[in-house]
Amino acid sequence: QVQLVESGGGLVQVGGSLRLSCAVSGSIFSINGMGWYRQAPGKQRELVAGITNGGAPNYADSVKGRFTISGDNGKNTVYLQMGSLESEDTAVYYCNADVVTTYGRSLRSWGQGTQVTVSS
C-alpha cells in the first residue's frame, strides 16, 4: 500500500502565500514523479504542477511564475510553494505520485486533498 498525506492548506488573502506539502509512505520501491492537481467547485480537476525524476518541472499556464514545485527525495515529499494567490486559486488541492511498489506494481496514488481558500 501507498499513502499520501497532504498538509498546508488554509485560508489566505489575495496576494498571500501558502506552502503545501505531500509526504508519500508505504511499500515504495521508487517514485517516478509527483504532482499537484486542484479542483474548484463545479470544475474538473486540473494539473497545477508536476515534477519527475531528472526532468524539469511543468506548470499550468495559470500558475507559472507564481507557484513552484519542489521535491525532497530523502523524505519522499513534494512541496508546492504558492505565491501571489488569486481568488481563482481557491480549490481543493490534491497530490499524486507515480510509484513502483516493492512488489513490482506501478500505480498512481492520490492524497485526500487539502482546501485552499483565497479571500479578497
Image (spheres, rainbow, N blue to C red):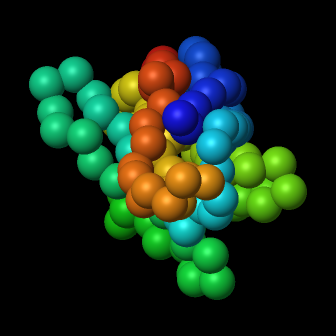
Q: Which of 114 and 40 is in front in this view?
A: 114
In this view, the residue farthest toward the right is 74
Number of marks in picture: 0
Where residue 20 appears, as percent x and y from the top left, is: 65, 36
Is residue 11 visible in this depiction of the protein?
Answer: yes
* Residue depicted at x 85% and y 57%: 74
In the rendered structure, the answer to whether residue 92 lies left or right of residue 26 reads: left
In the rendered structure, the answer to whether residue 76 lies left or right of residue 99 reads: right
Is residue 17 visible in this depiction of the protein?
Answer: no
In the rendered view, tell whether residue 13 sits above or below residue 32. Answer: above
Q: Nearer the viewer, residue 86 or 101?
A: 101
* Residue depicted at x 14% and y 25%: 42
Where residue 22 appears, as percent x and y from the top left, is: 64, 38
In the rendered structure, the answer to whether residue 75 lies left or right of residue 85 reads: right
Where residue 106 appears, as percent x and y from the top left, is: 42, 59
Where residue 86 appears, as percent x and y from the top left, is: 46, 37
Q: Nearer the viewer, residue 50 or 23?
A: 23
In the rendered view, tell whether residue 14 sits above or below residue 97. Answer: above
Using the rendered view, name the quadrant where residue 65 is placed.
bottom right
* Residue depicted at x 17% and y 38%: 44
